[in-house]
């Protein structure tokens, strides 16, 4: 990968916009437990997350039961200025939602999720950059496009150039018709836009639009537009005020027109936002910095938020009457004749706040969460009596990060995005102060007071007017009783967070002074209580616990054993029991307790020959050791079974030896030097190994060069194909990649079955699918230049149903291919013909620098960062991609992934279903062995060995987060950092910070004192 001009080292992390959408799959049809998608806009990056709500693992208040998993991330060719979900229409319940993206100054784009390619598909684009009539002679447009979508999915609207309205009409059905739906594997596809038209707002008396929102409760789409008629500012309120206006436009989509149906004049000049209110109250909230207005077609309710809107104005004076003296005002009071008219006589809130910067989201139909600029959360409640809103109340609800957006995801989850800190996924729970109390009746029921009024029970007096009145009252009372109970307050609990490195104010560097030559990039990030100092590392620098020099090591492994003492059970039950070192011509066995003790002569491991691989079977109770000439089954260090390669169980050809092997309980996959594969299975009842018939897996003329076993822990692949729990991935000499299921039959026998066959694997296609006859015929002559498959791995990190298998391959030119599996039939909504299993390629920035393989003479081989000298990679005795789990510390979280050995080793860490590559600081000698190591003296650590035989027991650095493009450590400051410098001599950082502090009253100045000293 080359970069002609620049390379982005750190992707944006600040969240600009967050919306909820059924973008990748319609709600309620995902078996993985995902309710809806969370769509985030981060500058020019669009990210889509699955929000998974899992049952809590414990009853602790700190238990995390919900999390965000990345579905896809796409870098766009412009900053996303506006984002809104275009919902599906009610008649098409199986549709997915589309996304409307806005780019400055006047570009609109509608995209949907392509289930077959696992990527974005553009369904329509609408550009108005060249429409000079909409610009009205202006050349600069500081305000970005404002977008909104009709809640019923009938249309969407955008305001461009500050006062030009664009209406996008939704199409009924899929945007590409039935052929597209069938190709995408679904019946309905996704919502789309049929066309667009513009509306001249100036003809409707509208200009300088501030905000738009679609209202609920109308048969046609109704757009509420907030604008300012004659602009003013705070210094001219005595001359001109109440300049804000709101106009409701009814959009006739068939006639492509808009009509005013009602409007509101006299709004405060600083009204800046409209928020649609959901049913049953409907209407809209008009947000001003100092007051809130609930507005409908017939009425409004006002709530004063602070003293700047509370002062009552003077009465109008007669003509010629002098203006009265200005009264003595408090520190936070407005001059009386500057108060907006709507604030006169309005009730005051119980708390003081300012909504100059505020974000709104509805937790329930009558409860709205308000997140203001300093991170304080408030709960706004509408006093709805079943017919109309009687008033507004607001109360403090909590404290969070400085928000840039808020979004409700479900009935119990919300997301708070931030540009100045970590973005949070929060679980909210409503509770009432007086639970169990009956709602008081608004009037006595009929018959309750008949004795007091003297009315007889058998009276036949009938008054039609009274009956009509009582029917109206009964209907009103039924509406009140059917109204859902609204919680009085909410509790909030953080479930997950996304790393935020926003508001970067200053950067400096520190060069390494030790033998490691560690270099760091230090930045001032965050704001307020989210301010921090961020230390970026380009490489991973492990903490070395101990270092031992041993004879030349070829490979190493760590295994478990059921022989651990009872005192080590419980939390430490998963400590490794043995460390096996494969040497040039022998094998060394170490027992891992409080100390490392060599037990080579005390155990029955094969120690007179090198080891090919070793692993656990039988639920970690047995150990399988594979050597070039035999396979051993051990328990407690004692040999239970020995099978030679040329014996009756394996039946290898004469002179063949084991070249490679893989272990995944209960199977052992063996690759012979002849290119044939053999499979052994561990039988639980008998406790011994048996052979599996692999005749179908061995093809004449196309030998296997690498193989891997995959344990389907969450049964995802088994649900797609055959129901098996273990699979084998094979890479052949021709570049063909196959996946076989190892299915247990009714007679307890294993029958391999091919479930995937790709004959163009080394091409590195963006989507990997099974090769059909037509595709094989159309193959170009480029097959001769394909790199060979050196090593292949198939893994899954995590056991939840949302996790998907990963396919990793190391090619002879040094490149690494990474794919994530997906089921195309499950992504759509219809019946899919063909093999539903596909793989989408994951982006890995793997830079090539040094040559590692010399192929045929006609093949031009690139260079690679692995830098492994001869022998060729295909002949190395040990694998170069090694799995690790739960490595790290409890502060920053443990990690899982793959470690790539070589002269320049690297970590492939899996985080939120995204594979991130972090290079490790290169050493003088290449690393040729790696294994995770969990021990009483080194918990969640790992072991490495280099070519000269130096073995190091290490741990990842604490408090360093690896779920970022670069490993980063955040040092919280709890204030806003502005400048930072590094002093080399003292090895210290100097920072300039600021923070808000309460004001102190200034004491009176004594006569004769120094005014400057007094201050």
Image (cartoon, rainbow, N blue to C red):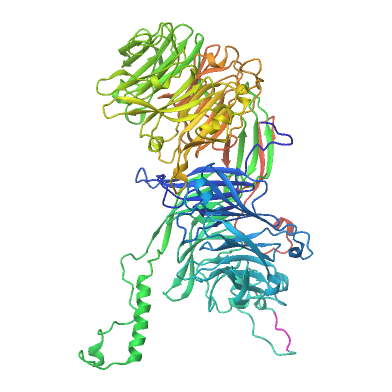
Which one is nearer the viewer's eye here, 686 or 228? 686
Q: Is residue 235 magenta?
A: no
Q: Is residue 586 above or below residue 299?
A: above
Q: Is 221 on the left or on the right of 467, as rendered?
A: right
Q: Which residues are magenta?
A: 321-325
Residue 440 in which image quadrant = bottom left
Task: Evaluate whether residue 767 shows in this view.
Answer: yes
Report x, y in % for residue 623: 35, 18
Q: Is 32 on the left or on the right of 283, as rendered?
A: left
Residue 346 in which image quadrant = bottom right
Report x, y in % for residue 93: 45, 57
Which one is nearer the viewer's eye here, 261 or 721? 721
Report x, y in % for residue 777: 56, 30
Secondary structure predominantly adopted by residues drawn in magenta = loop
Report x, y in % for residue 222: 56, 70
Task: Evaluate whether residue 564 shows in this view.
Answer: no
Which one is nearer the viewer's eye here, 146 or 382? 146
Q: Is residue 178 above or below residue 72?
A: below
Q: Is residue 437 above or below residue 812?
A: below
């Amino acid at each position: 990968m080359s970069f002609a001009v620049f390379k982005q080292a750190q992707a944006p992390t600040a969240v600009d916009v967050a919306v909820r959408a059924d973008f990748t799959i319609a709600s309620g049809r995902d078996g993985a437990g995902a309710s809806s998608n969370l769509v985030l806009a981060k500058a020019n990056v669009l990210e889509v997350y699955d929000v998974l709500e899992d049952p809590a693992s414990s009853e602790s208040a700190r238990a995390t039961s919900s999390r965000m998993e990345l579905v896809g991330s796409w870098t766009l060719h412009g900053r996303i200025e506006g984002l809104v979900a275009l919902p599906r229409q009610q008649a098409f319940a199986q549709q997915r939602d589309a996304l409307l993206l806005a780019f400055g100054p006047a570009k609109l784009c509608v995209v949907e999720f392509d289930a077959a390619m696992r990527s974005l598909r553009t369904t329509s684009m609408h550009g108005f950059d060249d429409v000079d009539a909409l610009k009205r002679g202006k050349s600069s447009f500081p305000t970005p496009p404002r977008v909104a979508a009709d809640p019923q999915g009938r249309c969407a609207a955008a305001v461009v150039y500050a006062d030009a309205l664009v209406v996008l009409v939704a199409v009924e059905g899929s945007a590409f018709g039935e052929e597209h739906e069938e190709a995408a594997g679904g019946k309905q596809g996704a919502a789309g836009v049929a066309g667009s038209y513009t509306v001249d707002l100036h003809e409707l008396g509208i200009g300088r639009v501030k905000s738009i929102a679609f209202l609920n409760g109308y048969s046609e789409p109704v757009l509420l537009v907030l604008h300012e008629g004659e602009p003013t500012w705070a210094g001219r309120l005595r001359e001109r005020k109440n300049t804000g206006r709101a106009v409701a436009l009814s959009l006739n989509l068939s006639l492509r027109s808009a009509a005013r149906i009602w409007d509101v004049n006299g709004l405060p000049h600083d009204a800046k936002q409209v928020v649609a209110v959901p049913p049953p109250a409907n209407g809209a909230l008009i947000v001003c910095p100092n007051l809130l207005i609930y507005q409908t077609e017939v009425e409004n309710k006002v709530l004063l938020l602070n003293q700047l809107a509370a002062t009552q104005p003077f009465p109008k004076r007669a003509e010629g009457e002098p203006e009265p003296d200005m009264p003595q005002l408090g520190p936070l009071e407005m001059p009386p004749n500057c108060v907006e008219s709507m604030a006169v006589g309005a009730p005051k809130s119980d708390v003081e706040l300012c909504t100059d910067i505020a974000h709104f989201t509805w937790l329930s139909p009558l409860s709205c969460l308000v997140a203001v600029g300093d991170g304080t959360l408030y709960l706004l409640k509408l006093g709805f009596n079943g017919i109309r809103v009687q008033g507004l109340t607001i109360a403090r609800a909590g404290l969070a990060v400085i928000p840039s957006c808020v979004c409700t995801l479900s009935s119990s989850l919300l997301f708070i995005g931030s540009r100045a800190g970590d973005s949070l996924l929060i679980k909210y729970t409503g509770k009432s102060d007086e639970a169990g109390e009956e709602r008081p009746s608004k009037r006595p029921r009929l018959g309750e007071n008949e004795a007091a009024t003297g009315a007889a029970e058998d009276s036949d007096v009938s008054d039609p007017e009274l009956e009509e009145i009582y029917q109206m009252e009964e209907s009103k009372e039924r509406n009140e009783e059917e109204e859902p109970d609204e919680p009085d307050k909410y509790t909030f609990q953080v479930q997950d967070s996304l790393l935020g490195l926003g508001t970067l104010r200053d950067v400096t560097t520190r060069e390494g002074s030790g033998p490691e030559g560690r270099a760091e990039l230090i930045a001032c990030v965050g704001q307020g209580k989210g301010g921090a100092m961020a230390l970026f590392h380009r490489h991973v620098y492990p903490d070395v616990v101990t270092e031992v020099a041993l004879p030349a090591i070829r490979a190493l492994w760590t295994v478990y054993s059921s022989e651990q003492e009872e005192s080590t059970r419980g939390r430490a039950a998963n400590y490794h029991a043995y460390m096996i070192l494969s040497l040039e011509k022998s094998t060394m066995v170490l027992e891992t307790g409080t100390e490392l003790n060599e037990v080579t002569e005390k155990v029955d491991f094969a120690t007179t020959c090198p080891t090919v691989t070793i692993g656990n079977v039988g639920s970690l109770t047995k150990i399988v050791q594979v050597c070039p000439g035999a396979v051993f089954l051990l328990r407690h260090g004692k040999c239970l079974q020995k099978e030679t390669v040329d014996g009756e169980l394996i039946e290898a050809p004469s002179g063949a030896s084991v070249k490679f092997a893989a272990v995944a309980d209960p199977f052992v996959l063996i690759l012979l030097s002849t290119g044939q594969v053999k499979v052994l299975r561990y039988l639980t009842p008998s406790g011994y190994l048996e052979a599996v018939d692999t005749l179908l897996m061995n093809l004449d003329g196309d030998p296997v060069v690498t193989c891997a076993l995959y344990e389907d822990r969450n049964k995802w692949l088994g649900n797609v194909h055959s129901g098996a729990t273990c699979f084998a991935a094979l890479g052949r000499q021709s570049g063909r990649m196959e996946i076989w299921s190892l299915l247990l039959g009714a007679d307890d026998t294993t029958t391999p079955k091919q479930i995937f066959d790709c004959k163009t694997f080394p091409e590195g296609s963006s989507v990997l699918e099974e090769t059909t006859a037509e595709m094989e015929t159309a193959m170009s002559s480029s097959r001769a230049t394909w790199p060979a498959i050196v090593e292949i791995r198939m893994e899954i990190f995590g056991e939840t149903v949302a996790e998907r298998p990963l396919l990793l391959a190391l090619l002879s030119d040094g490149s690494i291919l990474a794919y994530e599996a997906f089921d195309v039939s499950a992504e759509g909504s219809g019946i899919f013909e063909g093999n539903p299993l596909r793989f989408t390629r994951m982006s890995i920035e793997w830079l090539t620098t040094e040559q590692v393989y010399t192929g045929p003479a006609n093949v031009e081989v690139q260079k690679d960062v692995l830098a492994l000298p001869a022998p060729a990679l295909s002949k190395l005795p040990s694998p170069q991609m090694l799995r690790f789990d739960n490595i790290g510390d409890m502060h920053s979280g443990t990690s899982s992934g793959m470690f790539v050995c070589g002269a320049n080793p690297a970590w492939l860490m899996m985080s939120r279903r995204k594979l991130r590559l972090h290079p490790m600081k290169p050493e003088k000698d290449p690393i040729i062995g790696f294994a995770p190591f969990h021990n009483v003296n080194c918990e969640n650590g790992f072991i490495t060995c280099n070519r000269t035989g130096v073995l190091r027991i290490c741990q990842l650095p604490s408090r360093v987060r690896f779920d970022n493009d670069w490993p980063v450590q955040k040092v919280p400051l709890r204030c806003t950092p502005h400048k930072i410098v590094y002093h080399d001599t003292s090895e210290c950082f100097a920072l300039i910070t600021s923070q808000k502090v309460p004001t102190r009253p200034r004491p009176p100045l004594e006569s004769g004192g120094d005014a400057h000293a007094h201050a």
